[in-house]
Image (cartoon, grey):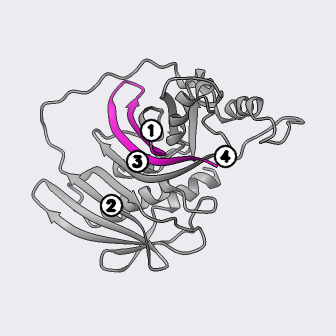
Amino acid sequence: MNEATRTVLAHLQLEERLPDRFTPVSANAGWPQVFGGQLIQQALCAARNTVDSDKALASIQATFISRSSRDSPLSYAVDRLHDGNSAATRQIAVSQDDKLCVSGTVAFHKPEESLSHQAPAPTAPAPEACADLLEVESIYQSYYPDDLPERTGPVELPPQPVEMRFVDPDALLKPGTASGSQMIWIRFSAQLGDDLEQHKMILGYASDQSVSHVALQPHALGGYNPGIQFLTMNHSLWFHRSCRVDEWLLLARECNSMTSARANVTGSVYTLSGDLVATMQQTALVRTR
């Protein structure tokens, strides 16, 4: 387990200083603001700590209100809106220095037998056949030679908490016309235990990886264009089935609308065997600098 994965797991350690009021034990991560995936992950964890174990995480809808800094501790306040026989709902407020940063709702549901169906998984090459971050960086440098230092020898990227394999990196990075869809394989970089609720929390962290970049593909702009500014407005995630996030998951995303600087991205998460385990949606401000 590398330092990056230990950091993500440490985010799940919350101290309950007052009833239903939690403070993370570890320091924040991000540059320089806190990474949105950390906020989602810890909101899920704080809410999970207030619900009976027979009810499973079902969804989170979070609105990002103001930026949060790496330099100050965060606080997670949970309000118990509803506790029923089969479902529970929690309101959560994430604050820093008496400033509200995130407001959200987390839903729980007791698993039960029912009718079941899903949309089929899209066809994608195996993760091992797709480009990793080092290959993506090489492609990026070929399109933006002035934005990264010139390679003078073998290059190694620092360990990442979430491995990513890009199905079509050229469509994401090349400054040319492409569709507004994108597929990425993701996998947590360390082996986790059998607590499937923890896997959902880590999926919450991973679901915020480079989401809104897909919005640039139809506009002849590279997805990691240094002249573009991204700011997340809201992020939602629905858990349909349990899964292991330390095994490969296919994240298929599409930007179905961008207007008035607001990009709306929807996504579906599938296992290697094609099970639909989660659906996500994010709205972000996308502005040229």
Please tell me whether mark 2 or mark 1 is closer to you in this view. 1
- Closer to the N terminus: mark 4 or mark 2? 2
Q: Which residue is mark 2?
A: 104
Question: 10 Å neighbourhood of mark 4: few (<14), some, or many (≥20)?
Answer: few
**Measured Cα–Cα span from mark 3 to mark 2:** 20 Å
Asked whether the viewer can see residue 192, the reply is: no
Q: Residue at x 38, y 61 (%)?
A: 43
Tag shown at residue 199: 3
Q: Position of residue 142 (x, y in %)?
A: 77, 29
- Closer to the N terminus: mark 3 or mark 2? 2
Question: 10 Å neighbourhood of mark 3: few (<14), some, or many (≥20)?
Answer: some
**Measured Cα–Cα span from mark 4 to mark 1:** 33 Å
Q: Which residue is mark 4?
A: 159
**Measured Cα–Cα span from mark 4 to mark 2:** 31 Å
In the image, 237 versus 99, the foreground residue is 99
Queried whether the magenta region covers residue 264, the answer comes back as yes
Left or right of 98 in this view: 277: left
- Closer to the N terminus: mark 4 or mark 1? 4
Looking at the image, residue 94 lies above or below residue 5: below
Q: Position of residue 182 (x, y in %)?
A: 50, 29
CB-based contact (under 8 Å), mark 4 and mark 2: no
What's the residue type where badge 4 is placed?
Pro
Left or right of 231 in this view: 138: right
Looking at the image, residue 81 lies above or below residue 210: below
Q: Judging from the image, what secondary structure is the residue with disc 4 in?
A: loop
Q: Position of residue 40 (x, y in %)?
A: 42, 56
In the image, 166 versus 228, the foreground residue is 228
Q: Judging from the image, what secondary structure is the residue with disc 3 in?
A: helix
Tag shown at residue 258: 1
